[in-house]
Image (spheres, rainbow, N blue to C red):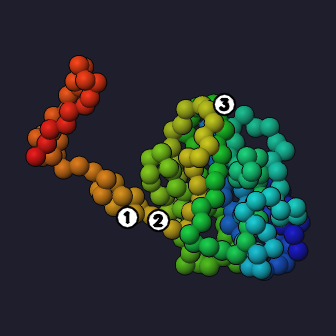
Amino acid sequence: CYMALLIFFSSNIVLSQDNIEKIQIDFTMPNGFVRHLLMGFTPDNQASDGYDYGYDARNIDTFPDDLNWIIDNNRYVIQGVGAFDAEKRYSLGMFLANPGDIQIELKATYQFGASRKIYVYDSLLETYTDLNEDVYSNTMLSGNYLNRFYIAFKDDSDKIAEAKNSLSVPEEFLEKTSIQFLSRTNEVLVKTN
């Protein structure tokens, strides 16, 4: 069975009988309209993270505000991928002609493990919102947001904090350090303890 057999009727989805795990994400636009997005995981890896005929559906609508899966720099409303992998993140593109409040929420899951977490990762704010428990909400300016929002299945906040701390410099080091430019020799002189 192919994911393209899925039929969208306003807020209802009719699903063909198959063994593909699915998640439905809903995006509420600043004007209140809702975009439905679907992702399916093929346990036999018949689909990939790239474009797969019969598994991925391009966005053919022209909404002034929208959220789409991004595959090979193109916009999709359905994305089929291989078997579920908690280490992967899937790119979302947000396109806003109008500024305002937006929401991203988990609307439904189908044959998807109940204990699995689904997050919106905001790479600008470096935050994870657990869609199983909450809705991602933000007030956005108009513009195109690529490489900012992702659907993730693992919260890597601890790794981000650890990386920031490992790259940080103690305050006392900065207080005892001086940097000067020596114009006669075109050199930078750094003095520290």
Q: Position of residue 43 (x, y in %)?
A: 74, 79
Q: Is residue 186 above or below residue 152?
A: above
Distance between the Cα atoms at labels 1 and 3? 35 Å
User: Is residue 117 visible to the viewer in this orientation of the structure?
Assistant: yes
- The mark lying in front, picked from 1 and 3, is 1
**Quadrant of the rendering where the N terminus is positioned:** bottom right
Binning the other alpha carbons within 10 Å of mark 2 as few (below 14), some (14 to 19) or many (20 upward) gives some
The amino acid on which the numbered mark 1 sits, given as a three-letter code, is: Asp
Q: Is residue 110 left or right of residue 86?
A: right
Binning the other alpha carbons within 10 Å of mark 3 as few (below 14), some (14 to 19) or many (20 upward) gives some
Q: Position of residue 34 (x, y in %)?
A: 69, 48
Q: Please name whichever residue, 173 or 97, is drawn nearer the observer in this view of the structure.
A: 173
Q: Which residue is mark 2?
A: 155
Q: Position of residue 162 (x, y in %)?
A: 34, 61
The amino acid on which the numbered mark 3 sits, given as a three-letter code, is: Ala
Closer to the chain start, of discs 1 and 3, is: 3
Q: Which residue is mark 3?
A: 97
Q: Is residue 141 left or right of residue 184?
A: right
Q: Please name whichever residue, 60 or 184, is drawn nearer the observer in this view of the structure.
A: 184
Distance between the Cα atoms at labels 1 and 2? 8 Å
Residue at 84%, 78% in the rendered image: 17
Q: Which residue is mark 1?
A: 158
Q: Quadrant of residue 176?
A: top left
Label 3 element class: loop
Q: Is residue 23 left or right of residue 57?
A: left
User: Is residue 6 visible to the viewer in this orientation of the structure?
Assistant: no
Residue at 57%, 50% in the rendered image: 149
- The mark lying in front, picked from 2 and 3, is 2
Q: Quadrant of residue 191?
A: top left
Label 2 element class: loop
